């Protein structure tokens, strides 16, 4: 799973560094709690993005269901947070999420002097690309979650997603079916 804040660069340009850090800390606490409630691993924060995964180091046969529940919880929390922001005269915050599933390499990766427990593989790249494709969804939802067909077919409740588009994803050959979590 990758999450990203829509329009964060513009937002941060109007905030002081301390205000930016405070905003991000609050946001990551909200999003992180949703991931952790589903026993996900927060891999890292990348600017205003969060990378998380399920299924390692402990196997989780229901990792797809957990990731989708976390995404729905993030949407619910963001909706509530945006109601409070609007009541305070602040602009709403929009989040994009990409979720993919499949085989990856998990372990300590990096230079000998700086190793990180992380995962790598095509599945990771696809999740990040889906989050970016979320920019093309034209609506005012608080959270837009795009998932791969692999995620869709593993969902115990496939009616909780709808086909969105078939398109090319950056740095991949051919098109892929993309679904939107509802």
Image (cartoon, rainbow, N blue to C red):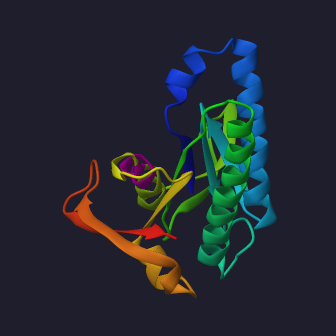
Q: Nearer the viewer, residue 44 or 50?
A: 50
Name the image quarter holding residue 35: bottom right
Q: Is residue 55 visible?
A: no
- 45 to the left or right of 10: right
List the single residue furthest toward the left. 174
Name the image quarter holding residue 28: top right
Q: Main secondary structure of the magenta part?
A: helix
Magenta stretch encompasses residue 15: no
Residue at the image point whose x is 22% and y is 64% from the top: 175
Q: Is residue 142 visible?
A: yes
Image coords of residue 49 (percent x, y): 58, 40
Q: Quadrant of the N terminus?
A: bottom right
- 70 to the left or right of 110: right
- Range drawn in magenta: 129-134
- 33 to the left or right of 14: right
Q: Nearer the viewer, residue 108 or 134?
A: 134
- 161 to the left or right of 109: left
Image coords of residue 145 (percent x, y): 50, 60
Name the image quarter holding residue 174: bottom left
Q: Nearer the viewer, residue 9 or 113?
A: 9
- Compared with 16, 176 (above or below) is below
Q: Nearer the viewer, residue 63 or 134?
A: 134
Magenta stretch encompasses residue 130: yes
Residue at the image point whose x is 51% and y is 24% from the top: 9
Image coords of residue 70 (percent x, y): 68, 64
Image coords of residue 147 (percent x, y): 45, 66
Residue at the image point whose x is 59% and y is 75% from the top: 64
Residue at the image point whose x is 74% and y is 19% from the top: 19
- Compared with 73, 132 (above or below) is above
How many dots with numbers?
A: 0
């Amino acid at each position: 799973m990758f999450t990203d804040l829509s329009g964060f660069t513009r937002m941060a340009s109007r905030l002081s560094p301390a205000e930016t850090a405070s905003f991000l800390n609050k946001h990551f606490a909200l999003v992180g709690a949703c991931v952790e409630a589903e026993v996900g691993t927060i891999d890292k924060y990348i600017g205003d993005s969060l990378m998380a995964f399920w299924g390692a180091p402990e196997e989780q046969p229901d990792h797809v269901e957990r990731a989708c529940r976390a995404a729905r919880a993030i949407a619910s929390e963001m909706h509530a947070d945006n109601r409070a922001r609007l009541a305070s005269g602040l602009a709403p915050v929009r989040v994009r999420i990409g979720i993919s599933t499949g085989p990856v390499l998990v372990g300590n990766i990096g230079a000998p002097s700086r190793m990180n427990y992380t995962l790598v593989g095509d599945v990771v790249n696809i999740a990040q690309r889906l989050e970016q494709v979320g920019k093309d969804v034209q609506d005012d939802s608080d959270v837009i979650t795009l998932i791969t067909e692999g995620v869709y077919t593993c969902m115990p409740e496939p009616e909780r997603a709808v086909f969105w588009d078939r398109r090319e994803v950056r740095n991949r050959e051919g098109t892929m079916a993309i679904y939107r979590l509802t």
